[in-house]
Image: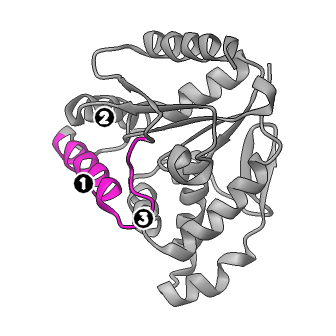
Amino acid sequence: MNFNNNNIAIDGYAATGKSTLALALSLDLKMKFLNTGKMYRLVAIFNLRNNYTEEELEKNLRKLKFTYKNNKVDIKNFIYDQLELQSQEISELSSQLSKLKFVRDYLTKIQRKILKKGGFIVEGRDIGTVVIPNAKIKFFLTVSDEEGAKRRFKEMEENHNNLKYQEILQKIKDRNKEDKTRIIAPLIPAKDAIKIDTTNKNYNEVFNLIKNKILEINKNV
C-alpha cells in the first residue's frame, strides 16, 4: 500500500511513542519508515564526541553522509549503540542543536530528499508543518507531562538508568516547552493534522486509531 506515493506525517510531544508507532504502522501498511528524531540524535553524538563549538559544528556538519536502507537512517561509517543513542544526555543535546538554523536546514534538506519518492510514514516534531507540509495525512500526538514521564521512567528502568521520576518529569516539561517555543520550526500541529491525546490510551488503542484513520482517509483520496 503506497497511498499514491504520498507520505504520512506523525508529529508530537516527547514520550508519545511516535517512533514505535510509526515503525509498526509502516510495517503493517507495507510502507517505508523514517525516524527524523534519530537524525538529530546522531548529530548530537557527532558533536559531543568532537566537542565542537557551534561554529565548528556548522563547518563540519556537511561531512556527515546520511544513508537510508531497510527503514533505518544512519551516518556512513559512524559507530554507536542504542544506549548511547537513547541516553538522556544525547536527548537533551539534540534538543539544543535542533534550535540551530543550519542544523535544521541541513537535516530538512536530507529528509526531503529521502522522502521525495513518497510512500513513507515519517515521525518527528515539524514534519507536517515544515518538512513535508503537503503530506495528505498528518497526525499530532500529545500526552500529559505526568503520563509521558511515567512511560519514559519505565523505559529508563529497563535500560538500568538511575534517573528519578521527578527528574524525568522536569526534563520532559522542559523539552516540550523548548520545542514549542523555539523560533525555528516550533512543535505545533499543522492546521489539518488529526490530533490524538494518548494520555489515557494504551499502545494498541493508539495504533488502531491511527491505522483506521489512515485507511478511512485513503478510501477518499
As rendered, which of 200 and 72 lies closer to the eye? 200
Helix, strand or loop at mark 1 = helix
- Where is residue 129? Give x, y as percent: 50, 49
Residue identifier under label 3:
93
Q: Measuring 55% from the left and 25% from the top, which residue is drawn there?
A: 21
Single out the mark in the foreground, 3 or 2. 3
Q: Measuring 78% from the left and 38% from the top, which residue is drawn there?
A: 118
Question: Which of the two discs, 1 and 3, labels the residue nearer the N terminus?
Answer: 3
Question: Which of the two discs, 2 and 1, labels the residue nearer the N terminus?
Answer: 2
Q: Main secondary structure of the magenta part?
A: helix
Where are the magenta residues, as a range?
Answer: 166-189
Residue identifier under label 1:
174
Question: Which of the two discs, 3 and 2, labels the residue nearer the N terminus?
Answer: 3
Indicate the colouring scheme: one colour
Which quadrant, please, contains the N terminus? Answer: top right
Residue 16 magenta-highlighted: no
Q: Do callouts 2 and 1 mark residues in contact (Cβ within 8 Å)?
A: no
Q: Quick check: 133 above or below 39?
A: above
Q: Measuring 76% from the left and 24% from the top, which residue is drawn there?
A: 3
Q: Residues within 10 Å of mark 2 (few under 14, many from 20)?
A: many
Asked whether, in this view, residue 188 is left or right of residue 105, the answer is: left
User: What distance separates the C-alpha of mark 2 from that of mark 1?
Assistant: 16 Å
Q: Quick check: 24 above or below 92?
A: above
Q: Given the image, on which type of amino acid does mark 3 rest? A: Leu
Asked whether, in this view, residue 86 is left or right of residue 136, the answer is: left
Disc assigned to residue 153: 2
Single out the mark in the foreground, 1 or 3. 1
